Amino acid sequence: MIKNYPKFSKVQLHQIIKTELLRVKILAFNSAQIAHDTATHKENIAENKYDTLGLEAAYLAYGQTQRVIECDQDIQLFENLKVKNFEEDTSINIGALVVLQYDESIQLLFISPCAGGAKIQYCDQEISLVTTTSPIGKQLLGKYKDDEIELVINGIKQTKQIIEVI
């Protein structure tokens, strides 16, 4: 296990991620409801062709409703993900918790089927969810512990070493 890191429980990690996905869905639902209420409020009935507040709120309500649907899909995808620990000879794929090191920094990434870019806190560590369609996800897919990946971030080439796959 990694020095100075707690023992990670994949079951707990999955539960925390599911809880975060549900929290995001609730926020999206509440935002959709507020936008819908704004769009249908009697004070927002257009008085002339330049009065577009109600129309704009309707577009926003539609977009927020689509976000709720996406959140439902994310939750379903994640619930179908089997919790498993990775062995030394198992390549990185969806469901892996990957620990990268570059310079003196450590980065924790969970290879997720959805919700790329989301961040969660677990065992006092920030873990970023990445999908296999993201640049870093594509690079990690199929790699093993002790492999290296190269990324260009803000025009700067970084080499990161995979120090743990959980």
Image (spheres, helix red, strand yellow):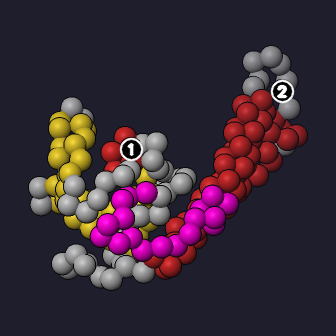
Q: Amino acid at mark 2?
A: Ala
* Label 1 to label 2: alpha-carbon separation: 48 Å
Identity of the residue drawn at 84% across and 43% down: 41
- For image coordinates 37% across by 79% down, the residue present is 8
The percent coordinates of residue 34 (x first, y second) are 73, 50
Instruction: Please indicate whether residue 86 sits to the left or right of residue 18 in the image.
Output: left
What amino acid is labelled 1 in the image? Lys
Q: Please state the horizontal and vertical placement of residue 164, each as a whole percent of the image.
A: 27, 67
**Residue at the (42%, 74%) spot, across then down:** 85
In the structure shown, which secondary structural element does the residue marked by tag 1 occupy? Answer: helix
115 over 45 or under it: above or below? below
Q: Check the image and report above or below for 6 versus 157.
A: below
Q: Secondary structure at mark 2?
A: loop
Prevailing SS of the magenta stretch: loop
Q: How many marks?
A: 2
Q: Quadrant of the N terminus?
A: bottom left
Quarter of the view holding residue 24: bottom right
Name the residue that disc number 2 marks.
Answer: 46
Q: Above or below — where is 52 with respect to 121?
A: above
Of the pair 126 and 57, the residue shown nearer to us? 126
User: Which residues are the magenta region?
Assistant: 76-93
Q: Is residue 160 left or right of residue 32?
A: left
How crowded is the residue under tag 2: few (<14 C-alpha within 10 Å), some, or many (20+)?
Answer: few
The mark that comes first in sequence, 1 or 2, is 2
Residue 53 seen in render: no
Mark number for residue 138? 1
Residue nearer the viewer, 34 or 150 = 150
Question: Which residue is at a point 30% across and 70% down the rendered structure image?
Answer: 88
Q: Is residue 77 left or right of residue 7?
A: right
